[in-house]
Image (cartoon, coloured by chain):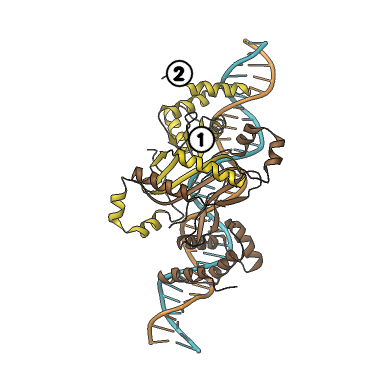
Chain colours: A yellow, B brown, C orange, D cyan
Amino acid sequence: MKPHRELSIFRKYLEKRGLKLTSERQALFDELFARHEHFEADELLVRLRTKHKKISRATIYRTLDLLVDSGIVGRVRIGESGYRYERLRAGEHHDHLICNECGRVIEFFEPAIESLQDQVCEKYGFLALSHSHQLRGICRQCRPRVSSREAGRAAAAAAVPGGKLRILPTA
Amino acid sequence: MKPHRELSIFRKYLEKRGLKLTSERQALFDELFARHEHFEADELLVRLRTKHKKISRATIYRTLDLLVDSGIVGRVRIGESGYRYERLRAGEHHDHLICNECGRVIEFFEPAIESLQDQVCEKYGFLALSHSHQLRGICRQCRPRVSSREAGRAAAAAAVPGGKLRILPTA
DNA sequence: ATGCGATTGCGACTCAGTCTCAACTGGCGT
DNA sequence: ACGCCAGTTGAGACTGAGTCGCAATCGCAT
């Protein structure tokens, strides 16, 4: 495991405000950086519960808050319910393509869109602090399956009934 | 109150699937088209409770689902919790600028962004069914007040504890 | 090693939204 | 005009995600 630039950022962040790097925070951090790009709070909870030690749901959320606040992790509303989290590589930014069928999340970055956004803000005198941009639909892998199953609009209606959406295994 | 093109769309939608236009559905529809552009489920509940008749929360949500499904109303995740709904003028589409200070929601439409989105989808073989695009920050009216209060990053950190996202209107 | 503020787990709690089910009703068929 | 019955309703229980309060515990500067 390499030195983790992020870990030192986190350390610094904690130090700066007199917080402590507890074993729970460490464990969560490690788990998170072990591999997962996108994940949900309860996913982490389960993973840590089996692997490491008992850790409470509250602690997961509290720690995640710290990570978000320190800028290492991003909190996003994807899907029908709750938040999803994702690691943020410093300076990088991206938006999301989300498959209604398999839940896959594809990241994309389009500089031209970003700059158009800036123009929009300017036009309205709006100071943007953050943004989120998601397209929902059917990914390349699912398209054949879906289109053979039913025609366009039925699929659309079924996919986002407004209620149910499955929770997905983080790709 | 004019003929409401939307009402006939709704009627047709119900008819087509053997559903009924009950007095509750009517009342909700009327309330919604009386004036409100953006609203939350519980807002509607309260308004209908005082004004019209008793109507249950479940019915509000059920009816809203129908309206969303029929394409008349859009469901959006704005803010930290729950959904917001908005009337959709046929054929029109817009995205949102949301003020973290006053909650104001500004709609915008930028064709160039839309077409860039399409390009992104093509690139990934993604079939987009809907999208959401929101910028969060400080609106023109709030900017003077905020900037005099505190400097940039503190405001940013506090204002956007997480990303915000929305779902979409089916169609 | 000590002390004390930060942190933890627990479980109770909230809030938005969903579900169940018995009672009710819209509107077609006659 | 009427009856019928699938569709609809309200009430309240329920769920799931996330938050909170608190007593016990832990990190870490000294």
At x 46% / y 63%, what residue is drawn?
B70
Amino acid, disc 2:
Pro
- Chain-order first, disc 1 or disc 2: 2
Q: Residue at x 46, y 40 (%)?
A: A112
Q: Which residue is mark 2?
A: A3
| Vertical order, D30 against B9 (above or below) | above
Quadrant position of residue A140:
top left
Residue A74's mark? 1
For badge 1, the amino acid type reads: Gly
Q: Can you give x and y, in whole percent of width and height, for residue B160 in the image?
A: 59, 39
Label 1 element class: strand
Rendered position, A53 above or below B87: above
Specify the subunit that label 1 lies on. Answer: A
Q: Position of residue B94 (x, y in %)?
A: 51, 53
Which image quarter: residue D12?
A: bottom right
Residue B51 in view:
yes
Circle 1 packing at 10 Å, graded few (<14), some (14-19), many (20+), is: many
Q: x%, y% of residue A123? A: 59, 46
Element type where label 2 sits in the image? loop
